[in-house]
Image: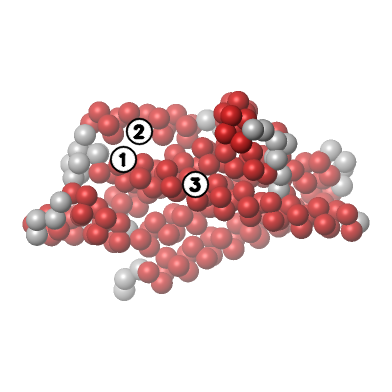
Amino acid sequence: MSDFIKEAILSGILETFEMTFFASLFSYIVGLPLGVLLYATSKGRLLENKAVNGVIGIIVNITRSLPFLILLVLLIPFTRFVVGTSIGTVASIVPLTVGAIPIVARMVESSLNEVNPGIIEAATSMGASPVYTIIHFIIPEATPSLLQGGAINVATVLGYSAMAGVIGGGGLGAIALQYGYYRYQKDVLWTTVALLVIMVMLIQEIGIRMSKKTRKT
């Protein structure tokens, strides 16, 4: 493997981390409130609202149902509008974020649904408002599950980032495609695959450890 390829792989690792970090951050900025809203407006919850829950649920389900490669192509005009181009590392962050938002929302909703109803009843009996109960009782109680779900979401974004190379995105996916697939350099292909697997395993392990530390015994 030439020095040029080694430098390209190192650059690809940094680009992959950049895409994963910012896409995960932006997806949680939008997805976390959406997930809380899905939970709070569902049947029997603190802010039950069938109309709001139904509309958000439909949007989330439709977005989740689209294969990521198709979403990449569909979002090209939107990506150009947001960052001025549809090619490169920065451009890839846009579809990665959009693709991750519904996954984050459903994961957050699922984590909040695991909270013991008795905690909610106790908070309500003390006169806590629905918003106060969600922020100070439900979310803290669901933190271990949220952290574990967060690790899964970040790993999912990392996996999606590898597909961004198909439309000119950066990162390890682009290197695997350009050198490993198009130029038949199998050593490059397997190296990038191994690196992606290791990165996913590390992220999941960090998430599990953080979850265990915050989980009450």
Mark 3 residue type: Phe
Q: Earlier along the polypeptide chain: callout 3 or callout 1? A: 3
Residue at 31 percent across and 73 percent down: it is: 217
- Label 3: which secondary element: helix
Select label 3 or label 2 by which is in front: 3
Q: CA distance from mark 1 to mark 2?
A: 7 Å
Picture disc at residue 14:
none
User: Horizontal placement of 171 versus 112: left or right?
Assistant: right
Kindly indicate whether the residue at mark 2 contacts the one at mark 1 (C-beta within 8 angstroms).
Answer: yes
Q: CA distance from mark 3 to mark 1?
A: 18 Å
Q: Amino acid at mark 1?
A: Leu
- Mark 3 or 2 closer to N-term? 3
Label 3: few (<14), some (14–19) or many (≥20) C-alpha neighbours in 10 Å: some
How packed mark 1 is, by other alpha carbons closer than 10 Å (few <14, some 14-19, many 20 or more), is: many
Residue at 62%, 30% (x, y): give it: 80
Q: Position of residue 161 (x, y in %)?
A: 63, 45
The x, y position of residue 44, in whole percent, is 18, 41
Residue 171 visible to the viewer: yes
Q: Amino acid at mark 2?
A: Gly
Up/down of 125 relative to 74, above or below: below
Residue bearing the label numbered 3: 26
Task: Please state which of residues 58 and 10 is positioned toward the viewer in this rendering.
Answer: 10
Q: Which mark is residue 38?
A: 1
